[in-house]
Amino acid sequence: MRTFQLPKLYPRLNLALIGALVVLSPPLQAQEGVFLTEGDAPKAVFPDADTFERHVIVATPELRDRLRVLLRNVEPSIWEAVRSPSQVGPPRPGTARSHVSSKP
């Protein structure tokens, strides 16, 4: 496989071209929205719970291997709650949303 290399004849021109590409390239996309804090997230998901306990699980190589076997046919995904732009007013109390966005 052949890779692309810039000519070595004009190093300053190469730097100028790279700089122009960086400056003129479109901006990177970032996710926007309102996220819950670590303390607020469990309350939003389990509103009837009295207390919450955090348990740290160490991702050992053995655990990762077991999970790979168990999840071999599962496609990774993420859920996002979307709020219709036609809805007016604040969200209902007790609803679980870690991210709120308006999409046309």
Image (tube, grey):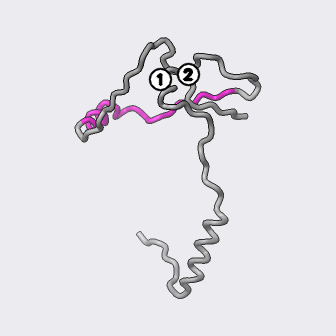
Query: Which residue is disc 1 drawn over?
Result: 42
Q: Is residue 55 left or right of 46 when viewed as pictured?
A: left
Nearer the observer, 93 or 13? 93
Quadrant in which the N terminus is drawn: bottom left
Badge 2: how crowded within 10 Å, few (<14), some, or many (20+)? some
Q: Which residues are magenta?
A: 63-83
Q: Where is residue 91? Give x, y as percent.
A: 66, 21
Q: Which mark is residue 96?
A: 2
The amino acid pointed to by label 2 is: Ala
**Which residue is pictured at 26% across the width and 35% down the height?**
63
The amino acid pointed to by label 1 is: Pro
Q: Secondary structure at mark 1?
A: helix
Q: Is residue 101 left or right of 7 when viewed as pictured?
A: right
**Which residue is pictured at 47% across the width and 23% down the height?**
42
Residue 71 figure quarter: top left
Badge 1: how crowded within 10 Å, few (<14), some, or many (20+)? some
Nearer the observer, 51 or 47? 51
Q: Where is residue 98? Give x, y as percent.
A: 55, 29
Q: Residue furthest left?
A: 62
Q: Secondary structure at mark 2?
A: loop
Nearer the observer, 25 or 40? 40
The question of residue 26 being in magenta is answered with: no
Q: Where is residue 33? Give x, y as percent.
A: 62, 36
